[in-house]
Image (cartoon, rainbow, N blue to C red):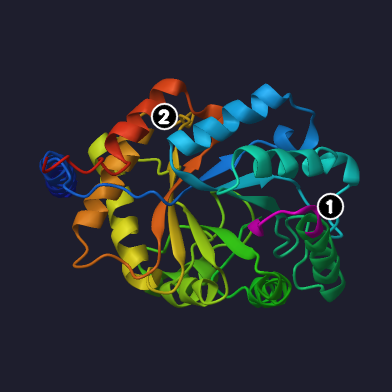
Amino acid sequence: MRGVLKRIGWLAVYVLGLVALVFAGAWVWWQPEPEARGTEVNALWARHQWVGEEHTEDEYRAFARLLRENRITDVYFHAGPFEPNGSVPPAKYRNAGKLIAAMRRHAPDVRPQAYLGQIRKVDGYGLVDLDDRAVRETVLKTDMIFLDLGFAGIHYDFEPIYHDDQGFLTLLDETRALTRPRGRLLSVAIEQLTTVDALQPVYKALLPRGWGRAHYPPRPTRDFLTKIADRADQVAIMTYDVGLPTRSLAGLHFAWHTEQTLRLIGDRTTVFIGVPTYRPSMDWAEDLPGALRGVRRGLDALDRPPARPYGVGVYADWTTSPAEWARYRATWLPRAPANVGG
């Protein structure tokens, strides 16, 4: 027994040593200031009240000014969620027409998109069954309502989406058939890449699917994310909620996903890396400055810029303080070119 306890003790010391090395390595990696700056192509998720409630002209004007100051090119206005049959009750978007008219007056260069989604029905969990053709047809009819109202595109956020979800890919094909002939956008919010694709069959065999951390995690494989990118004009990666204990590890998470995602699909579609302006209740290490620094470190790791536009997606307008917007401008937006010559 004494020998067994001794071996367990040495194993614990070994494991703790490895953990300490990981923490120390991440801290050392985190110290250098990133060289890359950000871009002037960025997105913002916006609260439902813009679509559902009345606003004054001053409120519209102030919002447009915020978008201009922060180089936001695309706003995902929450307009749902879908009902289980794929519809959205008109009362939920009663202010949408006025919003679109105000955006045309005050922010004509910004693309307002209808942000629509729901909990995807998987193995008995969830609300919307994307495998049901009748549900998808109703979703498409709902999309047409928002396109007719003047939205520049449809932004889908169905969760969870697993890497073999053919119903979701079919919906993207059908939605693209609506948006592209009309010169509108199709954009998708999706979880970050799997770290190791080969683990997905293991998860599938051992864990149930469904919604919640105790279930098989809904992460796209590289092949599945590429299929999404080939169907969508924009892909917004929900990189936040990292659940890591230090800012350096959280930053490493943002850097890795920025580099890997842009290498994989940055030549195929516009990519927005999601960054948070809220503090998750169980996460003391994740914040906007750390996320932006991590994204910039990921850009530093690229050997060339992606062929398509890229930027960050700020989540969300209702949680972003003036101080955070100021930090965003200072650390992310490209610096103005220096004045040279007479």
- Whether residue 25 is visible to the viewer of this picture, yes or no, is yes
Task: Tell me the magenta residue range.
Answer: 148-157
Residue 7 badge: none
Residue 83 badge: 1
Q: Which residue, given by chain and number where applicable, does mark 2 sit on?
A: 325
Viewer-side residue, 321 vs 247: 321
Residue at the far front: name it. Answer: 342
Q: Residue at x 56, y 48 (%)?
A: 110
Query: In the picture provided, is 102 more to the left or to the right than 223?
Result: right
Q: Amino acid at mark 2?
A: Trp
Q: Residue at x 57, y 43 (%)?
A: 45
- The reply to whether the magenta stretch includes residue 150 is yes
Query: In the picture provided, is 266 more to the left or to the right than 22?
Result: right
Crowd tier of the residue under label 1, counting other residues whose Cα lies within 10 Å: few below 14, some 14–19, many 20 or above: some
Mark 1: which secondary structure? loop
Query: In the picture provided, is 234 more to the left or to the right than 147?
Result: left
Q: Is residue 339 above or below residue 262?
A: above
Mark 2: which secondary structure? helix
Q: Amino acid at mark 1?
A: Glu
- The reply to whether the magenta stretch includes residue 267 is no
Query: In the picture provided, is 155 more to the left or to the right than 320?
Result: right
Q: Residue at x 21, y 50 (%)?
A: 36
- Residue 125 position, x and y percent, is 73, 57
- Residue 169 position, x and y percent, is 63, 75
Q: Earlier in the sequence, mark 1 or mark 2?
A: 1
- Residue 55 position, x and y percent, is 74, 27
Q: Give the quarter of the figure containing the C terminus.
A: top left
Toward which corner of the image does residue 30 lie, by quadrant?
top left
Viewer-side residue, 306 vs 70: 70
